[in-house]
């Protein structure tokens, strides 16, 4: 089992470096580990007919590891260009193209990743406006195309003037350091997803029946088919809203 830490910040000893170091410090001794700083590499896209030893070296490091930990600050409410450039240049390794132009996961399929990011704005502002969301979304989008499985995310807002990590974040980093040290199955969230689905359906059904009851006070719906149709429509609208939230919106903000 090997863990690879990837620091993608402008500052080599900044807050993201500290977050990453804190996670790596808590990785189990039985695991091999390595941390790389992307700014040490001159990362350029592969050109047709030309060798690109830097990309080959980085690709080998990714292949050797079972879990990748990306530490990238939020710049301009987006993922740091350092990591984005790395992802862009790695695209031919992350995904393969089918004849019709669709992509399928490449050679790193079923590896795991953890995302770390930070921003200047306060915890409250980030909670309300989601400044760090796009950084996490971009990582998720790329990893999902590459078939790499998410382990979690850590966000640290309010970093203006911060010199040292708050105790609560150190604890969270320790928790994730231990979590990523265990041998991973191909997709370890299947049971969790079924449980989430069960509760989603239970809540949606309750809300739907509640709305139907309210509507029943305004208009009389006695027919079985009208009841069935209104249940299906209300349930569909609520379920699509909640699925959208869980799929695209929900990211850690604190
Ligand atoms: C180019 C640049 C753009 C930034 N944009 C934002 C931003 O849009 N919102 C924000 O809250 N912080 C922003 N920041 C602040 C960084 O997210 C913050 O400094 C981060 O915690 C730095 O991490 P580091 O110490 O690892 O470099 C920006 C910083 C830089 C250098």
Image (spheres, rainbow, N blue to C red):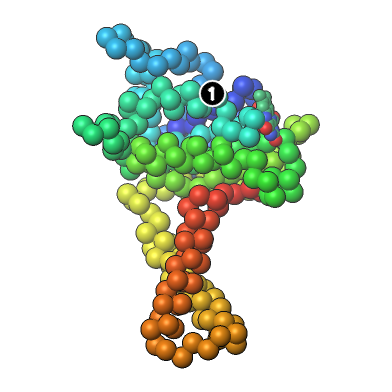
User: What is the quadrant of residue 60 in the picture?
Assistant: top left
Image quadrant of ligand 1 equals top right
Give the left or right position of residue 122, taking residue 109 as reference: right
Label 1's element? helix
Q: Indicate left or right for 172 with 97 as reference.
A: right
Q: Quadrant of the N terminus?
A: top left
Q: Residue at x 46, y 77 (%)?
A: 230
Badge 1: residue crowd in 10 Å (few <14, some 14–19, many ≥20): some
- x then y, percent, for residue 80: 57, 28
Q: Residue furthest bottom?
A: 222
- Would residue 202 be found to the left or right of residue 145 on screen? right
The residue at which mark 1 appears reads as: 82
Q: Residue furthest top?
A: 50
**Residue 39, located in which quarter of the rendered image?**
top right
Query: Is residue 48 something that shows in the picture?
Result: yes
What residue appears at the point 51 percent right and 27 percent down from the top-left corner?
83
The spot of residue 7 in percent (x, y) is: 54, 28
Measuring from the top left, give residue 19's x and y in whole percent: 61, 36
Residue at the far left in the pictured view: 99
Q: How many marks?
A: 1
Question: In the displayed structure, would residue 79 be above or below residue 190?
Answer: above
- Given residues 204 and 96, the one toward you in this image is 204
Q: In x, y percent, where is residue 180?
A: 46, 45
**Of all residues shown, which one is farthest toward the right?**
161
Residue 31 shows in the view: no
Residue drawn where x is 64% and y is 30% of the image: 76
Query: Which residue occupies 41% across, 61% down?
Result: 193
Q: Quadrant of residue 89?
A: top left
């Amino acid at each position: 089992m090997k863990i690879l830490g990837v620091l993608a910040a402008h500052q080599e000893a900044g807050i993201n470096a500290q977050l990453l170091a804190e996670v790596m410090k808590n990785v189990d001794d039985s695991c091999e580990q390595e941390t790389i700083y992307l700014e040490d590499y001159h990362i350029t896209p592969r050109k047709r007919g030309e060798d690109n030893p830097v990309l080959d070296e980085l690709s080998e490091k990714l292949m050797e590891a079972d879990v990748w930990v990306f530490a990238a600050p939020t710049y301009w409410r987006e993922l740091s260009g350092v990591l984005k450039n790395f992802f862009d240049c790695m695209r031919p390794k992350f995904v393969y193209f089918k004849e019709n132009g669709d992509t399928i996961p490449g050679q790193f399929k079923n590896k795991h990743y953890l995302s770390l990011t930070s921003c200047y704005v306060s915890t409250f502002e980030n909670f309300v406006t989601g400044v760090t969301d796009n950084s996490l979304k971009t990582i998720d989008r790329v990893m999902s195309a590459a078939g790499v499985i998410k382990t979690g995310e850590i966000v640290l807002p309010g970093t203006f003037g911060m010199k040292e990590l708050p105790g609560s974040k150190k604890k969270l980093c320790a928790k994730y350091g231990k979590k990523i040290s265990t041998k991973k199955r191909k997709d370890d969230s299947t049971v969790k997803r079924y449980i989430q689905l069960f509760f989603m359906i239970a809540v949606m059904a309750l809300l739907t029946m509640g709305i139907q009851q309210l509507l029943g006070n305004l208009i009389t719906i006695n027919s079985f088919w009208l009841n069935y149709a209104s249940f299906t429509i209300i349930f569909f609208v609520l379920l699509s809203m909640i699925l959208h939230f869980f799929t695209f919106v929900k990211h850690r903000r604190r």
